[in-house]
Amino acid sequence: MSDLLHVFALAAALVGAGSLALMRRGVGHPEIAAAALMVIGMADAMTLALLPPIVWFAVMLPAALALAARCRSPRASGARAGSAALTGHLALGLVSTAALILLMTTMAPDAVPAPDAVPPPDAHGHGGGAMMPQLMAGAFGLGAVLLGAIALRRERSWAHRLHHATMAASTVAMSAIVIL
């Protein structure tokens, strides 16, 4: 099941990134670079794992901040006012992709400690954080669905709608990998 979700998430991300190239308004080199970064990071994390997930997180988070700064001041970047929503959506996509790549490692079979493992002496005696990866992944998935629905209502172009729908589908699939 996990492999099927991986393939679906990556395919949806590829379609979403490809739809950016078809858009005539609001897409510049930073937006296309952000989409490519998400696809490359997902592909690496899901297949070869050439870079550790924390490196992908460390690369994607500053890229998301740079995109957010770009959509904050459209006059300084030369972007149109209508493209700020797409740029902001991509910045949030970078944050959720980076976090989900990092969270997927917590669900690996070797990430679960053995039952006879002795906790460190300063550890708390409860497992309150055991469900935190699933809760965070669920929040990212629900947030992607909500923002995708809002974007689908606002956008009129089919390329924009395709991008938002596939980005939400990819995020939901990655969230499901962590949850299941």
Image (tube, helix red, strand yellow):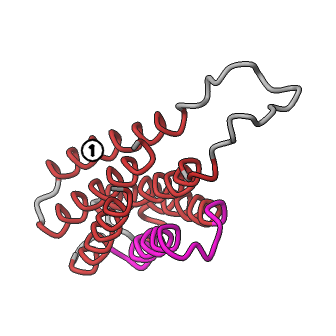
Dominant secondary structure of the magenta stretch? helix
Q: Residue at x 85, y 32 (%)?
A: 120
Residue 25, placed above or below residue 4: below
Q: Could you tell me which residue is drawn at 25 percent across and 62 percent down?
A: 166
Mark 1 = which residue?
Answer: 145
The kind of residue on which mark 1 rests is Val
Does residue 94 appear to the left or right of 168 in the view shown?
A: right
Q: Secondary structure at mark 1?
A: helix
In the image, is 138 to the left or to the right of 49? left
The answer to whether residue 29 is left or right of residue 154 is right
Q: Is 44 within the magenta? A: yes
Q: Is residue 8 magenta?
A: no
Q: Residue at x 58, y 31 (%)?
A: 130
User: Residue 48, how many percent across, how many down?
Assistant: 54, 76
Query: What's the magenta region?
Result: 27-55
Where residue 115 appears, as percent x and y from the top left, is 68, 35
Q: Which one is nearer the viewer's eye here, 72 or 144?
A: 144
Give the image quarter of residue 75: bottom left
Is 172 situated above or below 87? above
